[in-house]
Image (spheres, rainbow, N blue to C red):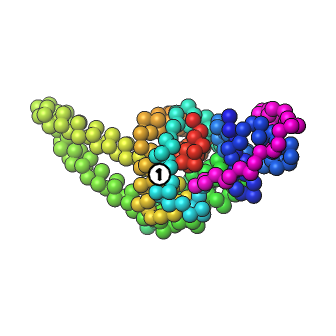
Amino acid sequence: MQWFYSINGERLGPVTPEQLSTLVANGTVTAETLVWREGFASWEAWGKVADANPLPAVAVDVPPPEAVPVVDYPASAADGWTLDEFSEPLQTNGFRTSVGGLLSRSWQTYKSMFGLAIGAVLVLVLISIVVGLLPVVSLLGAFLVTPQMNAGAAWIFLKKSRGEPVEFGDVFAGFSRCYGKLILVGLIQMAAIICIAVPIGIVAAVTIPMLEQMGNGGDPSPVVMVLGAIVGLVVFFFALWLSVRFLLTHIAAVDMQGSAMDAYRMSWRITAGKFWTLFGVFLILFLLSIAGTLALLIGMLFVAPLYPALIAQVYHEASEAAAGRPVE
Protein backbone atom coordinates (compact mmCIF):
# COMPACT_ATOMS: atom_id res chain seq x y z
CA MET A 1 0.00 0.00 0.00
CA GLN A 2 1.32 3.42 -0.97
CA TRP A 3 0.61 6.71 0.76
CA PHE A 4 0.60 10.32 -0.42
CA TYR A 5 0.79 13.39 1.80
CA SER A 6 0.48 17.15 1.40
CA ILE A 7 2.91 19.74 2.74
CA ASN A 8 2.12 23.44 2.22
CA GLY A 9 -0.34 22.56 -0.52
CA GLU A 10 2.17 20.36 -2.40
CA ARG A 11 1.15 16.73 -2.82
CA LEU A 12 4.07 14.37 -2.25
CA GLY A 13 4.55 10.66 -2.69
CA PRO A 14 4.19 7.83 -3.02
CA VAL A 15 5.78 6.50 0.19
CA THR A 16 5.58 3.07 1.79
CA PRO A 17 3.97 2.54 5.22
CA GLU A 18 7.49 2.23 6.67
CA GLN A 19 8.50 5.57 5.15
CA LEU A 20 5.28 7.20 6.34
CA SER A 21 6.00 5.87 9.83
CA THR A 22 9.38 7.60 9.75
CA LEU A 23 7.80 10.84 8.47
CA VAL A 24 5.32 10.74 11.34
CA ALA A 25 8.07 10.01 13.86
CA ASN A 26 10.28 12.91 12.75
CA GLY A 27 7.35 15.35 12.64
CA THR A 28 7.17 15.83 8.89
CA VAL A 29 3.66 14.38 8.89
CA THR A 30 1.55 15.70 11.77
CA ALA A 31 -2.02 15.12 12.87
CA GLU A 32 -3.13 18.01 10.62
CA THR A 33 -1.26 16.81 7.51
CA LEU A 34 -3.56 15.69 4.70
CA VAL A 35 -2.89 12.14 3.50
CA TRP A 36 -4.38 9.83 0.88
CA ARG A 37 -4.15 6.19 -0.07
CA GLU A 38 -6.12 3.87 -2.34
CA GLY A 39 -9.57 3.36 -0.87
CA PHE A 40 -9.96 6.88 0.52
CA ALA A 41 -12.83 8.92 -0.93
CA SER A 42 -10.88 12.13 -0.33
CA TRP A 43 -7.76 13.51 1.34
CA GLU A 44 -8.01 13.26 5.14
CA ALA A 45 -6.04 14.66 8.08
CA TRP A 46 -3.60 12.04 9.38
CA GLY A 47 -4.90 12.48 12.93
CA LYS A 48 -8.37 11.47 11.73
CA VAL A 49 -7.30 8.22 10.03
CA ALA A 50 -4.22 7.20 12.04
CA ASP A 51 -6.06 4.87 14.43
CA ALA A 52 -7.68 2.94 11.60
CA ASN A 53 -4.38 2.70 9.69
CA PRO A 54 -1.66 1.49 12.09
CA LEU A 55 1.87 1.85 10.77
CA PRO A 56 4.87 -0.40 11.41
CA ALA A 57 7.25 0.60 14.17
CA VAL A 58 10.14 2.85 13.20
CA ALA A 59 13.43 0.97 13.06
CA VAL A 60 16.19 2.96 14.77
CA ASP A 61 18.81 1.81 12.30
CA VAL A 62 16.82 2.86 9.23
CA PRO A 63 17.56 6.39 7.95
CA PRO A 64 14.62 8.66 7.09
CA PRO A 65 13.41 8.47 3.49
CA GLU A 66 14.91 10.74 0.89
CA ALA A 67 12.97 13.77 -0.27
CA VAL A 68 9.97 12.57 -2.22
CA PRO A 69 9.34 14.32 -5.54
CA VAL A 70 6.17 16.33 -5.94
CA VAL A 71 3.44 14.51 -7.84
CA ASP A 72 2.37 16.36 -10.95
CA TYR A 73 -1.27 16.47 -9.96
CA PRO A 74 -3.76 18.17 -12.31
CA ALA A 75 -5.94 19.39 -9.48
CA SER A 76 -7.72 22.44 -10.85
CA ALA A 77 -7.83 25.16 -13.44
CA ALA A 78 -5.63 27.28 -11.19
CA ASP A 79 -2.77 24.86 -11.89
CA GLY A 80 -3.00 25.69 -15.57
CA TRP A 81 -3.54 22.22 -16.98
CA THR A 82 -5.20 21.88 -20.35
CA LEU A 83 -7.42 19.27 -21.97
CA ASP A 84 -4.53 17.38 -23.53
CA GLU A 85 -2.37 17.60 -20.40
CA PHE A 86 -5.16 15.93 -18.47
CA SER A 87 -6.60 13.44 -20.94
CA GLU A 88 -3.32 12.05 -22.30
CA PRO A 89 -2.10 10.65 -18.94
CA LEU A 90 -5.68 9.57 -18.23
CA GLN A 91 -5.65 7.47 -21.37
CA THR A 92 -2.17 6.11 -20.59
CA ASN A 93 -2.92 5.20 -16.98
CA GLY A 94 -6.48 3.98 -17.55
CA PHE A 95 -9.53 4.83 -15.51
CA ARG A 96 -11.35 2.12 -13.58
CA THR A 97 -14.44 2.51 -11.44
CA SER A 98 -17.57 0.58 -10.44
CA VAL A 99 -21.17 1.17 -9.43
CA GLY A 100 -20.61 0.08 -5.84
CA GLY A 101 -17.36 2.00 -5.49
CA LEU A 102 -18.82 5.23 -6.84
CA LEU A 103 -21.87 5.04 -4.62
CA SER A 104 -19.82 4.23 -1.51
CA ARG A 105 -17.21 6.96 -1.99
CA SER A 106 -19.80 9.56 -3.01
CA TRP A 107 -21.80 8.78 0.12
CA GLN A 108 -18.71 9.15 2.31
CA THR A 109 -17.98 12.59 0.84
CA TYR A 110 -21.63 13.62 1.15
CA LYS A 111 -21.81 12.40 4.75
CA SER A 112 -18.68 14.33 5.70
CA MET A 113 -20.37 17.62 4.69
CA PHE A 114 -24.00 16.64 5.21
CA GLY A 115 -25.34 19.94 6.55
CA LEU A 116 -23.53 22.07 3.96
CA ALA A 117 -24.68 19.81 1.12
CA ILE A 118 -28.32 19.88 2.20
CA GLY A 119 -28.22 23.66 2.65
CA ALA A 120 -26.56 24.23 -0.73
CA VAL A 121 -29.03 22.08 -2.63
CA LEU A 122 -31.96 23.69 -0.82
CA VAL A 123 -30.75 27.15 -1.82
CA LEU A 124 -30.35 26.04 -5.45
CA VAL A 125 -33.86 24.59 -5.45
CA LEU A 126 -35.26 27.86 -4.12
CA ILE A 127 -33.37 29.79 -6.81
CA SER A 128 -34.83 27.47 -9.46
CA ILE A 129 -38.34 28.07 -8.13
CA VAL A 130 -37.88 31.85 -8.18
CA VAL A 131 -36.42 31.75 -11.70
CA GLY A 132 -39.33 29.61 -12.87
CA LEU A 133 -41.82 32.19 -11.61
CA LEU A 134 -40.26 35.04 -13.58
CA PRO A 135 -41.81 35.16 -17.09
CA VAL A 136 -38.76 36.20 -19.11
CA VAL A 137 -35.99 34.81 -16.93
CA SER A 138 -37.61 31.37 -16.87
CA LEU A 139 -37.16 31.15 -20.65
CA LEU A 140 -33.51 32.13 -20.42
CA GLY A 141 -32.71 30.16 -17.27
CA ALA A 142 -31.61 27.10 -19.27
CA PHE A 143 -28.35 28.87 -20.05
CA LEU A 144 -28.25 31.91 -17.72
CA VAL A 145 -28.84 30.08 -14.42
CA THR A 146 -29.19 26.29 -14.61
CA PRO A 147 -25.69 25.36 -15.90
CA GLN A 148 -24.09 27.62 -13.31
CA MET A 149 -26.09 26.04 -10.48
CA ASN A 150 -25.27 22.51 -11.66
CA ALA A 151 -21.58 23.39 -11.77
CA GLY A 152 -21.62 24.95 -8.30
CA ALA A 153 -23.41 21.98 -6.74
CA ALA A 154 -20.75 19.59 -8.04
CA TRP A 155 -17.90 22.00 -7.27
CA ILE A 156 -18.36 21.85 -3.49
CA PHE A 157 -18.12 18.06 -3.56
CA LEU A 158 -15.06 18.15 -5.82
CA LYS A 159 -13.25 20.50 -3.44
CA LYS A 160 -14.13 18.25 -0.50
CA SER A 161 -12.83 15.17 -2.33
CA ARG A 162 -9.54 16.96 -2.94
CA GLY A 163 -9.14 17.83 0.72
CA GLU A 164 -9.62 21.54 0.07
CA PRO A 165 -11.61 23.78 2.45
CA VAL A 166 -15.23 24.20 1.38
CA GLU A 167 -17.35 27.26 2.09
CA PHE A 168 -21.04 27.81 1.42
CA GLY A 169 -20.18 30.49 -1.14
CA ASP A 170 -18.49 27.82 -3.29
CA VAL A 171 -21.93 26.69 -4.42
CA PHE A 172 -22.03 29.88 -6.55
CA ALA A 173 -18.70 29.10 -8.26
CA GLY A 174 -20.52 28.60 -11.55
CA PHE A 175 -21.41 32.28 -11.49
CA SER A 176 -18.11 33.63 -10.19
CA ARG A 177 -15.52 31.42 -11.91
CA CYS A 178 -16.77 30.94 -15.46
CA TYR A 179 -20.22 32.42 -15.97
CA GLY A 180 -19.77 33.17 -19.67
CA LYS A 181 -18.35 29.76 -20.45
CA LEU A 182 -21.29 28.06 -18.76
CA ILE A 183 -23.70 30.22 -20.77
CA LEU A 184 -22.15 28.73 -23.91
CA VAL A 185 -22.40 25.25 -22.37
CA GLY A 186 -26.12 25.85 -21.79
CA LEU A 187 -26.67 27.17 -25.30
CA ILE A 188 -24.96 24.14 -26.84
CA GLN A 189 -27.05 21.86 -24.65
CA MET A 190 -30.23 23.68 -25.67
CA ALA A 191 -29.34 23.32 -29.35
CA ALA A 192 -28.76 19.59 -28.85
CA ILE A 193 -32.14 19.22 -27.12
CA ILE A 194 -33.86 20.98 -30.02
CA CYS A 195 -32.12 18.69 -32.52
CA ILE A 196 -33.32 15.65 -30.59
CA ALA A 197 -36.82 17.05 -30.06
CA VAL A 198 -37.41 17.56 -33.79
CA PRO A 199 -37.37 13.84 -34.76
CA ILE A 200 -39.41 13.04 -31.64
CA GLY A 201 -41.99 15.58 -32.78
CA ILE A 202 -42.06 14.06 -36.26
CA VAL A 203 -42.57 10.58 -34.81
CA ALA A 204 -45.36 11.87 -32.58
CA ALA A 205 -47.02 13.65 -35.50
CA VAL A 206 -47.12 10.37 -37.41
CA THR A 207 -48.00 7.90 -34.66
CA ILE A 208 -50.58 9.88 -32.65
CA PRO A 209 -53.08 10.03 -35.54
CA MET A 210 -52.52 6.30 -35.97
CA LEU A 211 -53.36 5.68 -32.32
CA GLU A 212 -56.46 7.83 -32.62
CA GLN A 213 -57.51 5.92 -35.71
CA MET A 214 -57.01 2.64 -33.85
CA GLY A 215 -59.06 3.97 -30.93
CA ASN A 216 -61.90 4.82 -33.32
CA GLY A 217 -62.00 1.28 -34.61
CA GLY A 218 -59.93 1.98 -37.69
CA ASP A 219 -57.17 -0.12 -39.16
CA PRO A 220 -53.84 1.76 -38.73
CA SER A 221 -50.90 0.69 -40.79
CA PRO A 222 -48.85 -1.76 -38.71
CA VAL A 223 -45.72 -0.85 -40.63
CA VAL A 224 -46.03 2.81 -39.70
CA MET A 225 -46.76 1.93 -36.08
CA VAL A 226 -43.72 -0.34 -35.80
CA LEU A 227 -41.44 2.15 -37.53
CA GLY A 228 -42.69 4.92 -35.28
CA ALA A 229 -42.01 2.85 -32.17
CA ILE A 230 -38.52 1.92 -33.39
CA VAL A 231 -37.61 5.51 -34.24
CA GLY A 232 -38.95 6.69 -30.90
CA LEU A 233 -36.86 4.14 -28.97
CA VAL A 234 -33.74 4.90 -30.99
CA VAL A 235 -34.07 8.63 -30.36
CA PHE A 236 -34.75 8.05 -26.64
CA PHE A 237 -31.72 5.83 -26.09
CA PHE A 238 -29.53 8.12 -28.20
CA ALA A 239 -30.54 11.05 -25.98
CA LEU A 240 -29.86 8.95 -22.88
CA TRP A 241 -26.42 7.96 -24.20
CA LEU A 242 -25.51 11.58 -24.93
CA SER A 243 -26.68 12.64 -21.47
CA VAL A 244 -24.31 10.16 -19.85
CA ARG A 245 -21.38 11.00 -22.13
CA PHE A 246 -21.70 14.73 -21.38
CA LEU A 247 -22.53 14.26 -17.70
CA LEU A 248 -19.30 15.93 -16.52
CA THR A 249 -19.43 18.99 -18.77
CA HIS A 250 -20.49 21.46 -16.07
CA ILE A 251 -17.88 20.42 -13.51
CA ALA A 252 -15.19 20.33 -16.20
CA ALA A 253 -16.14 23.85 -17.28
CA VAL A 254 -15.83 25.28 -13.77
CA ASP A 255 -12.59 23.43 -13.01
CA MET A 256 -10.47 23.51 -16.16
CA GLN A 257 -9.13 26.13 -18.49
CA GLY A 258 -10.28 26.23 -22.08
CA SER A 259 -13.53 26.75 -23.93
CA ALA A 260 -17.03 25.39 -23.48
CA MET A 261 -16.31 22.83 -26.20
CA ASP A 262 -13.21 21.73 -24.27
CA ALA A 263 -15.48 20.99 -21.31
CA TYR A 264 -17.68 18.84 -23.54
CA ARG A 265 -14.60 17.08 -24.93
CA MET A 266 -13.30 16.44 -21.41
CA SER A 267 -16.57 14.81 -20.36
CA TRP A 268 -16.56 12.75 -23.55
CA ARG A 269 -13.05 11.42 -22.89
CA ILE A 270 -13.58 10.65 -19.20
CA THR A 271 -16.86 8.78 -19.76
CA ALA A 272 -15.52 6.70 -22.65
CA GLY A 273 -16.30 3.06 -21.89
CA LYS A 274 -18.15 4.00 -18.68
CA PHE A 275 -21.72 4.22 -20.00
CA TRP A 276 -23.15 1.17 -18.26
CA THR A 277 -21.41 1.94 -14.97
CA LEU A 278 -22.71 5.51 -14.92
CA PHE A 279 -26.13 4.44 -16.17
CA GLY A 280 -26.34 1.88 -13.36
CA VAL A 281 -25.37 4.45 -10.72
CA PHE A 282 -27.91 7.01 -11.82
CA LEU A 283 -30.62 4.39 -12.30
CA ILE A 284 -30.20 3.54 -8.61
CA LEU A 285 -30.38 7.24 -7.74
CA PHE A 286 -33.49 7.58 -9.87
CA LEU A 287 -35.17 4.78 -7.93
CA LEU A 288 -34.09 6.40 -4.66
CA SER A 289 -35.52 9.70 -5.88
CA ILE A 290 -38.87 8.06 -6.55
CA ALA A 291 -38.84 6.61 -3.05
CA GLY A 292 -37.91 10.03 -1.67
CA THR A 293 -40.74 11.68 -3.59
CA LEU A 294 -43.23 9.18 -2.19
CA ALA A 295 -41.96 10.03 1.31
CA LEU A 296 -43.78 13.38 1.23
CA LEU A 297 -40.91 14.91 -0.81
CA ILE A 298 -38.75 15.05 2.33
CA GLY A 299 -36.66 12.08 1.27
CA MET A 300 -35.95 13.75 -2.07
CA LEU A 301 -34.18 16.58 -0.25
CA PHE A 302 -31.71 14.06 1.19
CA VAL A 303 -31.25 12.16 -2.08
CA ALA A 304 -30.78 15.23 -4.31
CA PRO A 305 -27.19 16.06 -3.17
CA LEU A 306 -26.06 12.59 -4.21
CA TYR A 307 -26.40 13.58 -7.88
CA PRO A 308 -23.72 16.33 -7.83
CA ALA A 309 -21.70 14.24 -5.35
CA LEU A 310 -21.52 11.39 -7.87
CA ILE A 311 -20.67 13.71 -10.75
CA ALA A 312 -17.84 15.22 -8.71
CA GLN A 313 -16.64 11.76 -7.64
CA VAL A 314 -16.36 10.50 -11.22
CA TYR A 315 -14.43 13.61 -12.23
CA HIS A 316 -12.21 13.37 -9.14
CA GLU A 317 -11.41 9.71 -9.75
CA ALA A 318 -10.49 10.53 -13.33
CA SER A 319 -8.11 13.18 -11.95
CA GLU A 320 -6.59 10.61 -9.60
CA ALA A 321 -6.14 8.16 -12.46
CA ALA A 322 -4.48 10.84 -14.62
CA ALA A 323 -2.08 11.53 -11.72
CA GLY A 324 -1.21 7.83 -11.42
CA ARG A 325 -3.30 7.22 -8.29
CA PRO A 326 -6.27 5.14 -9.46
CA VAL A 327 -8.87 4.66 -6.74
CA GLU A 328 -9.81 1.18 -7.99
Vertical side of 116 occupied by 231: above or below:
above
- In percent of width and height, residue 162 lies at 65, 50
Which residue is at the front of the view, 237 or 302? 237
Q: Which segment is the magenta one?
A: 46-74
The quadrant of the picture occupied by the C terminus is top right
Vertical side of 274 occupied by 163: above or below:
below
* Left or right of 58, for residue 85: left
Which residue is at the front of the view, 4 or 312? 4
| 99 magenta-colored | no
- In percent of width and height, residue 29 lies at 80, 47
Q: In the rendered image, which residue does mark 1 sit on?
A: 88
Badge 1 amino acid:
Glu
The quadrant of the picture occupied by the N terminus is top right
* Left or right of 18, for residue 83: left
Q: Residue at x 34, y 45 (%)?
A: 239
Q: Residue at x 68, y 52 (%)?
A: 69
- In percent of width and height, residue 48 lies at 79, 41
Vertical side of 61 occupied by 242: above or below:
below
| 67 magenta-colored | yes
